[in-house]
Amino acid sequence: MRQLIFFCCCLTVVTTFAQQPLYKQLQTKLIEANNGDTIRLPEGTFSMPGSLSMEGKNDIVILGAGMDKTILSFKDQVTGAEGMKISNGRHIKLVDFTVQDAKGDCIKVQQVNGLVFKNIKAEWTGKPSSKNGGYALYPVQCQNVLIDGCWAIGASDAGIYVGQSKNIIVRNSKAYHNVAGIEIENSSYADVYDNEAWENTGGILVFDLPDLPVKLGTQSRVFRNNIHDNNHINFAPKGNIVAKVPLGTGMLLLASQQSEVFENNIINNRTSGISVVSYFMSENPIKDSLYEPYPHDAYIHDNTLTRKKQRATGRGRIGQMYRFKLKFGKDVPHIMYDGITDEKNNTQVICLYNNHEETFANIDAGNGFKNKSRDIKPYQCKGKSYEPVKLEWE
């Protein structure tokens, strides 16, 4: 097993494209590339009329002239869903270019072992809209994923999303004007650190959801992030799970297992700094008999949490809950727990330790909010810390 920082393979072929017609040349090269090739993109803005796809390749680098120098625009896309789709490969590296305005997801990567996004921007250039694609950067069912120095803007679901994957690092990246800035879903061994998420509906989400091939995620570490001012109106299409995320959410741990959240600045998120909730809060039925809907082992420590004295959102079901059931007024707690527990599991759900300006509420959602409490003492403890993620080749 070799540790992955950036895979540095021997590059046997370098291909440079003339500006016209770039789309046909690029798609041809993606189809015909030999393992070990570098596909070099020129400087400029290029219209892409259809999706770009690559399948079954190994040790490929797709290299632009710079994040803001090489721009692949899918604004006039007429065929395909994604801007770029890569599947069934090993050791794929995308570096120094931008993908804009895809009809669906900007860049989707599926079933790749060893994936690097370095200095990639994926964005929709207009105002945030439910008509935008769901995901900007979208690795799913992958292993050994590094997302470093990237930007994600305007996604109607999640800007930077990693789903059903294993061994993940998301660092030094920025996400704004998305519904969810950064989302880790049904994934194991994820480090999310040194990122900035702002002006999203929710800053950083760690979810475990039912009805997916990978049933359980575990051990996500979210640390040293700047998660601030995530107060954008939710513009997700109706029916999406993230459509239920209330504006003003800093972090949301939904049915997550073994999450460690530490040393983050969580500032001016109107509705909640950190929420730890079960899947029952979604009010969606659970038909997956193998699904675990309860969170447990959330260790939240050494974070800085500050917010303005203002009311939580009044929009949607969560807004109604705050207004008519919780009645916090302008004294909204920084950390909220739904209080819905698994009677068959005695594992500690939350440990809170050494958070700056830490305020808390157990809202007792399972009992109609009858016994909501702001007593933090039962949750003050030291939880388990986890080892840093190591990205490796098999």
Image (spheres, rainbow, N blue to C red):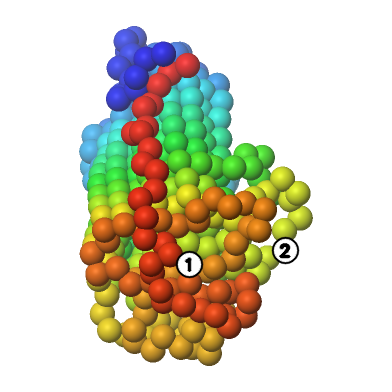
Q: Is residue 86 above or below residue 153?
A: above
Can you give x and y, in whole percent of width and height, for residue 282 in the image?
Answer: 61, 67
Residue 213 is labelled as none
Q: Residue at x 32, y 10 (%)?
A: 10
Q: Is residue 40 above or below residue 261?
A: above
Residue 285 is labelled as 2
Q: Amino acid at mark 1?
A: Tyr
Q: Quadrant of the N terminus?
A: top left
Can you give x and y, in whole percent of width and height, for residue 339 in the image?
Answer: 54, 68
Q: Earlier in the sequence, mark 1 or mark 2?
A: 2
Secondary structure beneath dot 2 equals: loop
Cα separation between marks 1 and 2: 21 Å
Q: Residue at x 47, y 16 (%)?
A: 394
240, 293: nearer the viewer: 293
Q: Residue at x 53, y 69 (%)?
A: 338
Q: Residues within 10 Å of mark 2 (few under 14, many from 20)?
A: few
Q: Within the image, what quadrant is residue 60 found in?
A: top left
Disc 1 versus disc 2: nearer the observer: 1
Q: Residues within 10 Å of mark 1 (few under 14, many from 20)?
A: many
Q: Is residue 324 left or right of residue 389?
A: right
Residue 277 can be seen in this image = yes
C-beta proximity under 8 Å, tags 1 and 2:
no
Residue 129 can be seen in this image = no
Q: Which residue is mark 1?
A: 337
Can you give x and y, in whole percent of width and height, for residue 84 in the image?
Answer: 47, 39
Secondary structure beneath dot 1 equals: strand
Q: Amino acid at mark 2?
A: Pro
Q: Residue at x 50, y 53 (%)?
A: 348
